[in-house]
Amino acid sequence: MAFIRSKIKNGKPCYYIVESYRDGKAVRQRIIEYLGSAEKILPLALKGWQSTQKAKESESGIDFSKVTFKSYVHGSVMGLLYMAQYIGIEEILDEILPKKNIKGMTRGRVLLLAMIHRAVDPGSKRNFSNWVEQTSLPYHLKFEASALGSAEFWEAMDGISEDELKTAQRTIVKRISDITNIDLNRFHLDYTNYFTFINSKNGNCLICKRGHNKQKRDDLRQFSLAVLTAYSLQIPIIWDLYAGNKNDKSEFAEFSDKIKKELQKMSIIPEDVTITFDGGSNSEENFKNIGFHFICSHSLKGLPALYDIDISEYENVELSSGKTKLAYRIDNLTFSGVTGTGILTFSQDLLDGQLAELEKEITKIKNNVDDLNNKLKNPKSHIFSELNNRKKFIEAEIVQVKKYNDALKEELSQPKKGRRKKEKDEPIWDMEKELLQILAKKVYSGNQFASEFSSISIELQEHDELKSYQIKLTIDNELKESYCNKYYGKKLTCTDYTSWSTSDILSEYANQECIENNIFKVSKDTRHFSVRPQYHWTDDKIRCHVFICLSAMIIAEMLRMRMEKAGLKLTKSAMLNKLSLINDGWIYNEGKKVVRAMGELDSNQKRMWNVIEDIKQSLSTN
């Protein structure tokens, strides 16, 4: 086979026509003709291209100088569409949800379009028609982009009950489980919340309440989400929307019951599964009727003796990920009313983080001391007002105790049988002691742990006949180091398993990060899948909106898994970004449509599109 090859001569590229031939087992090349430098062959190449174009124009009757191409986003939307059709999302929704026709489309079709929109470019449903007309969806699904606006989506989401959404979710997961043939027996549970801009006076939304927000927006009403997923299938398998002011411990009690019921409906026996969760769900009440195996983190505060186990007694344990962890195993450990296995672990990263926080707290304490020393110079400071109030309280108490003791003496002087009362000790007003108590509370300001290795004292100072108290802070560095060595860098993992190896328990707990990285962070990514912005203000619509967002994530994860099987390792977001660069559109000749065609693909895009074509092909064979 002949081809052109370049070779550098005198610092410039020259070109040859060469051909390959086999010399025994080796493949070699021989020169057929020397073409010359680039300057020499470029006019020849241009002349050849022009003659080719003229031949094409004369053959087709098309003037290529007047040909244009209108492109539409194609790869991402069609990849998600084919995968959704492969899962059967639209059919499942139309079968389970109340029947409704919206502008010639079923409810399932409209909700599926909302899912694709949410995955590719999250935005308001009012903006859907503007977005979708820039994609190839209207052409391939045969609908008018202007036909779908916020009113149509409101209609599609209306009248759907919570039970119907749960049934649809369960059916989708069952279908995916059958497709992937993944054994679902190990799960991970976690919680998050999403702030909203719902008016405080809006009484129609009962689920949105103010509470501790993980994005630091405690000033806004929020709703919370509990999700159960699996490391082997990182999609929302079971989820529950609950009030934003409800804590994890309270939600766990209710959600664990829902998990058991949902698993049974999916033909999974709860007693055979293992669920991993964080320590925020722990309580004796929650562990009483848990109904499944568990691995969880647990607070060390209720088991202070474990702090005394020195790091030198910990051993290196290799996890399934290949990482190693310092660990100390305690069999037959009783925690929150359960007897099982406890594993203490030490993390240098955790230690470094805690030490950094400690230094911030010490700096804050020192700043408090400086601030209070300035206030102590002012006799009208609120510190002295508080001290004066204490003095009045104790003086009043002294009077009351004195009255009581005088009355008791009078009573004791009279002959009387029975039990005798005792005199009360009179309180003593100690100004410096009371001042020190007031100042200690303000210095440590909720950081009482620092008093384990530090102390404060007050000294009376005189300057130019002016007297004032000054606080002196003393930090014992040896005690501080001993405190940090005892309490910092340690974590306790507990389980009801007694036969599992330390490595298996820690590896399974470590896998829990999948729910944070692949579901919660993704659901807050404003570029794809984001639950926010959401403009709904009734509980039913918010539930339906979250269902759309989580379903979009499910479809994209299934597409990502299919890509990974083909050797393309990408995150969901990166996959959609790359697929969005694949376009199709109309070729126009003098303003008239000629043919629908795809844009040219590079080698990587070809591999990705081949996966999508395989999914499409499997639809026609099913």
Image: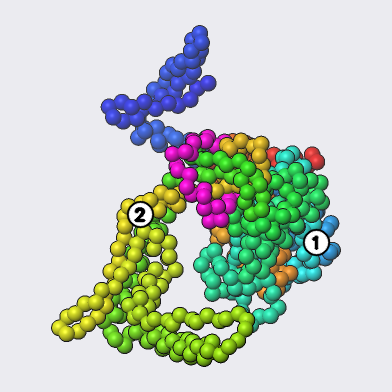
Name which residue type carries label 1.
Glu
The question of residue 314 being in magenta is answered with yes
Res. 479 mark: 2
* Secondary structure of residue under mark 1: helix
Q: Residues within 10 Å of mark 1 (few under 14, many from 20)?
A: some
Residue 262 screen position, x and y as percent: 78, 53
- Above or below — where is 218 with respect to 88? below
Spatial separation of the CA atoms under disc 1 and disc 2: 60 Å
The question of residue 385 being in magenta is answered with no
Disc 1 designates what residue? 164
Residue 581 screen position, x and y as percent: 55, 50
- Above or below — where is 414 with respect to 59? below
Q: Residue at x 76, y 53 (%)?
A: 260
Identify the image quadrant of residue 550: bottom right
Q: Residue at x 42, y 18 (%)?
A: 31
Q: Residue at x 30, y 66 (%)?
A: 473
**Segment colored magenta:** 295-321
**Residue 319 visible:** yes
